[in-house]
Image (spheres, grey):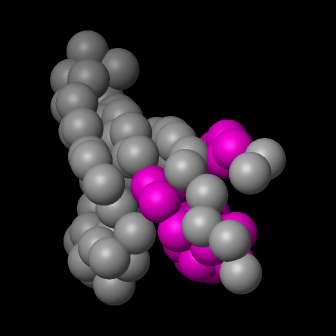
Amino acid sequence: MDKRVGVVGIVIENFESSVKVNDILHQYAHIIVGRMGIPYRERDISVISLIVDGTSDEISALTGKLGNITGINVKSAITKK
């Protein structure tokens, strides 16, 4: 399967879920090219953006697992080729 480049946006509204998020990101470290995390204290949330390079299945599995965590919102955009 062809590899694709994409961006994944993660908004953490429940800080207790941060450990689960980091565990999943560690599992998918092989497709993560870059990561930027910003705590937005005024809003009591954190935002993480990822640059990923993997197959559609790998990226979908990553976002699917993250999206199943309570208090986490995830969106992704990937290249067509």
For residue 26: magenta? no
Q: Where is residue 12 in the image (x, y as percent from the top left)?
A: 41, 46
Q: Which residue is drawn at 45% across and 55% down?
A: 52
x and y percent of residue 21 in the render?
A: 36, 67
Please say whether residue 74 is one of the residues in the magenta stretch. yes
Compare residues 4 and 69 and report the one nearer the observer: 4
Extreme residue in the right direction = 80
Q: Where is residue 65 in the image (x, y as percent from the top left)?
A: 57, 76
In-image side of 38 versus 24 (left or right): left
Along the line of sight, which residue is nearer the eye, 77 or 63?
77
Q: Is residue 25 visible?
A: yes
Quarter-wise, where is residue 16 in the image?
bottom left
Q: Which residue is more in the foreground, 51 or 9?
A: 51
Q: Residue furthest top?
A: 42
Q: In which quarter of the image is the N terminus?
A: bottom right
Magenta span: 52-79
